[in-house]
Image (spheres, rainbow, N blue to C red):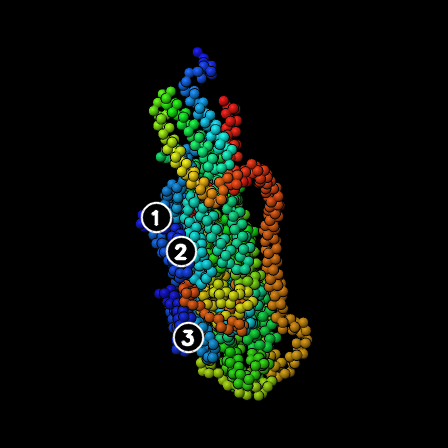
Amino acid sequence: MFTQLSITILLLPLLGFLLLIFFGKRLPRQGDWLASGLILISLLLSLYLLITKVTSHSAEVFTMTFSWAVVGSLNVEFGILIDNLAAVMLVVATLISTLVHFFSIGYMKEDVRYSRYFAYLGFFSFSMLGIVITDNLLLMYVFWELVGLSSYLLIGHWYEKKSASNAANKAFIVNRIGDFGMFIGIMILFATFSTFTFESIFDSIGSGQLPFGSHGWLTAAGILIFCGAVGKSAQFPLHVWLPDAMEGPTPVSALIHAATMVAAGVYMVARVFPMLTADALLVIAYIGAITALIAATIAITQFDIKKVLAYSTISQLGYMIMALGVGAYTAGFMHLVTHAAFKAGLFLGSGSVIYAMHKVLHAQNDHHTDAQDIRNMGGLKSKMPFTYWTFLIFTLAISGIPFTSGFLSKDEILAGSFAFSTLNGHWLLPVIGFAVAGLTAFYMFRLLILTFHGKPSDESRIAGITESPKVMTIPLMILASLSLFFFYSFNPFGAASGWFFGAIERPMSMVPEILQPATAAVFNEALHGIHTTAMILSILIAAGGILLAFAVYQWKKISADKLAEKAGFLYKGAYNKWYFDEMYDKVFVGGLLLLTRIMKWFDENIIDGIVNGSASVMKGISNISGWFDNNVVDGLVNATATSADRAGSMLSKIQTGKIQTYLVYVVFSFLALFVLFM
Amino acid sequence: MELSFFQLLAEPGLIHFLIVGAILFSLGLMAVLSKRNAIMVLMGVELILNSANINFIAFGRFTELSLDGHMIGLFVIIIAAAEAAVALAIVLNIYNRFKSINLDDISLMKG
Amino acid sequence: MELQILGIGILTWLVFLPIVGMLVVLLLPDKNRNAIRWTAAIATGAQVVIAGIIFALFDRTQLGINEAESFQFVEQFSWITVDAVPWVGRIEISYFMGIDGLSILMVILTALIGFIGVISSWNIDKMVKGYFALYLLLVTSMMGVFVSLDFFLFFIFWEAMLLPMYFLIGIWGGPRREYAAIKFFLYTFVGGILMLLTMLALYFSVAYTDPATGQSVHTFNILHMMNPANYIEGSLLAGIDTTWRYVAWMALFINFAIKIPLFPFHTWLPDAHVEAPTPISVILAGVLLKLGAYGILRLNFPIFPDATLYFVYFMAALGMISIIYGALCAMAQDDFKKLIAYSSISHMGIVVIGIAALNTQGMVGGVLQMFNHGIITAVLFLAVGVLYDRTHTRGLYDFGGIANQMPKYTGIAMVGMFAALGLPGLNGFVSELFSFLGAFEAYKWIAIVSVTGIIITAGYILWTIQRIFLGETPEKLHDLKDLTAREIMMFVPLLILIILLGVYPSPAIELMNTSLSHLVEFVTMGGS
């Protein structure tokens, strides 16, 4: 029943997409009610599925397969797999999607491609849900690329802007690079196991079969598949696309580039977790940690409200990936869920602000002031109370303050990395983890203070600002309530006792024993020893970050400019996003373009040169033979003709035209013959 | 027994007729080759034809050819008449065109 | 299986219907253009119907490839037979046609593309009569190649293709048409000569014993050439792994590599495409290129399995170079049509590495890629044609923001482009997937390097989309008209196939699965 239900959940948004793309403009209100209604039904069904699944069939896994293609003797099967992981993710995806649909009704009201926008949202939801419920790598790859497509279409929604279409291209291509690795990983697994299904792959590995019979290839396969997540979840070094993706409409940023699609990478790593070796997991953990740190440092220096949030998203995704890498499986996935709620909230909140700013600026005929620059804001607290208070809750949650959902999951991650380091001495991971926690608290409160507190730089500009309509604030309130602790665990200081940790358990590792990471039992024991320390430390660090933010931006005890000056090249580097874009532009894009130009030149001059050259040589030879023909062969022919002509004119002398002369010839010839032969 | 030429002449027979025919043929040929007037040339042709006739009749008389010789003779006379008619018509046409029947003037085919 | 209509075999109908159409076209008065167009449309449309019948009746479980009795819709008559030639014995050239899992997809593709080509030729105004006569001749000869099982017949159809193609490019083409036509002609002609030599060498090496008379008969029958027992002791191509067999394989291969076209034999393609009129580009990319890969599968692989095994790595490497090289060159182009031409080189490279994998996944992927690429490039070239008709330019930098002016066109062209990019859910992905999977099993590193091609492909396709459809619309493009009903009609069947085969490729795969598995087995076992 669960599988059929999940197929219904999957197909409803697709139906919405098809109806809107073909008939969108002819529907009343351009069909926004249709899209939102369908996704709402999906949400209700997923909620029902989650609740029944967790309460009555918790440990069971429901699958369904059907044959997609038979190639040779090989049957490629596609199927559906519903376990607790999928059930939770279904609710996350449909919930955020539904809220974003409703929010968009307000936010996108005057857009020229209103129905197209909702169609694409439906298509995105469809492909995202596909990733969630599939039971095999290939189908996951299929939906993986399809979410990439919908992301591409939505980032480029305002494609008249060059920056938007550039960002869309960048997102797709950078993701393709990650997908390239994932595809090779899939090929490695398929070449050995002749199947794409997770379960069969795990079983084969569990029974001792290895790709090409070597441990190295198994680790490589794991890391390569993780490459897909590096692309999609914007991990270092492929994180560069996500900030640019903010060119898309803000609700899209909330849905795709904060809550769901970018989290798909984390979901995927969780799915393939049993086949990851200790080495692969270590790589994953470090990639996550590096990403978290880099993004957090950049987020401090940015002034575009959406850019700050984008880098904070990258940083939080780094957390999740790190959590999976160190073995804090449930914590990582839980952070995905809690982060989805509060980050979607943050983006929608920023959308609400941008919407209000836009309206005001538009009314004042001001087309120069950037509606997204926090230096142009400030003091919005009283003008937009709903937005402010919800924004505050989200900020507290992301900073990891107790009684929020963010505290629960982040605390578990930090404790997990700590425990990991006590097991095998990778102390850098918890250090980065705690440092980023401080940075997060700092830059989020910097954002909050600059936007809502204090005095605006130009009082007259924001005088006319009003709160956004209900259709936008209600989703914010729903998300704010979801950012509180009791949805996940009734104990505000211990996630482990909540239903979530009960429902989602770290799966058994299937790799050969010598490649396995520390087992869940060993890990939990280590965790137990340091949990309280980690919790206190994390609260202190977060509080420190918040205090510092207030000191700098609210009370102005410390000058931000001086601080930046002191940091010197560090500030400059972070402000310029550590020059990743410039470097990639020069090295990879530039290199590729140069290569294409060389190839073009090679093709046109060398290869075609050889072809045309041989044609010229042939032409030269034919010229020579033509000369020979004209002068020697034809000469002979003409000489024959001339001599025949001469002989003819000589002989024509005897042609007198007088019949009697001829007769004389006849008679004498006859006589001559007569004499000769008789 | 081999007869000498004069012995053959002594006894009138085939050979006399053939000699007459040969003389007549030579005269006709002479006329054809040397006369300038087309009519005279035609008359030469008639002589040649009649020399052939004399031969046919003589062979019919003295050899197994018998009546066939006479038949062919008659045939030749008829053909000669027809030929004369056609030839005269041609000569008339030539005269119309060249205002002359002198064969030396008619040399359009000169190479 | 045999099927006859009016006592004439269905394959003969299939192949020669366009010739009938051509005769009718030639008899029609020059001024009656619509009658000429409709005649061509009816002739090719009937071909589509026949292809549909064949698709429905085709027995998916028959092996084909080297077993004469498992070919379907077979027609075999002796055509030229000379008894008792001194030294040689009996000479036999037969009219031998049949279909197996290898050719059926190509037959369907040819029928379909042929028909759509006629629709897109509707607005050709220059010498309509000559155009359609040549066009129909071209369709007949392409179809003939795909169904011939006699080498001589194969060769005749192969060379017959050259003539109409030469004139279609040379008369109805763009500004540099003579250059392009001559280049095309010379390239393919060189290949043709190599094939002729190989054919003769094979002919003199192969003789089978006629069971009826006990006579030793020299034959052009391709299936007899696949049987090692039929090679005459001591003849040029007898034995296994001899130098001459390698040479013969190479000669055939170069001929087909020119048609595919594989690096470094590809430079005729961009010129031919750029100069050819739209429908001819469609035919060229949609069907003609497939003849090369088809020839390799039909002739090189089963006739010379030993040489195939020897050269297959080399072939895969060439395929890899084509993929990367074609994609890089495509990225550097400013001309829309040239870009697609180079992308064809890249995509046909995928076919080559797929079939060079010599396993079923790769082989199925490769042949499916032939079909899919035919459909996708047809869409792309038609799309270029639509724009060219309206703006008379193909420069990528001359466009921009067309999405606002021509939404329907944009939607259709985007589907085609994303299919070319290998987006899952569209047909290009399925065939690329199986080709790469197969190739990876056979040659790990070649496959891995080849897969980088999908990144470059994404790069140039998205860049093209950006330059043409996105951005601000320049002033001169403000009054562009969206697609007409006729234009939509030519796109729709192709789009349906793109999506259908992308979501559920089984109907296409099961057509060829049996035959291709058998081919793989036959070749890897060394032809026994």
Q: Position of residue A627 (x, y in %)?
A: 62, 45
Task: Point out the frontmost of discs 1 and 2.
Answer: 2
Query: As shown in the figure, which amino acid type bears the numbered disc 3?
Result: Lys
In the rendered image, residues at marks 3 and 2 fall on the same chain: no
Locate residue A318 relative to residue B58 in the image: left or right.
right
The residue positioned 56% from the left and 78% from the top of the image is A372
Query: Which residue was labeled with disc 2?
Result: C25
Query: Which residue was labeled with disc 3?
Result: A25
Quadrant assignment, res A457: bottom right
Real-space Cα distance between discs 3 and 2? Answer: 45 Å
Query: As shown in the figure, which amino acid type bears the numbered disc 1?
Result: Gly
Real-space Cα distance between discs 3 and 1? Answer: 51 Å
Query: Which residue was labeled with disc 1?
Result: C9
Locate residue A539 relative to residue B75 in the image: left or right.
right
Q: Is residue A40 visible?
A: no
As helix, strand or loop, the secondary structure at mark 3 comes to helix
The residue positioned 40% from the left and 27% from the top of the image is B53
Q: Position of residue C78 (x, y in %)?
A: 38, 41
The residue positioned 42% from the left and 58% from the top of the image is C30
Task: Point out the frontmost of discs 3 and 1.
Answer: 1
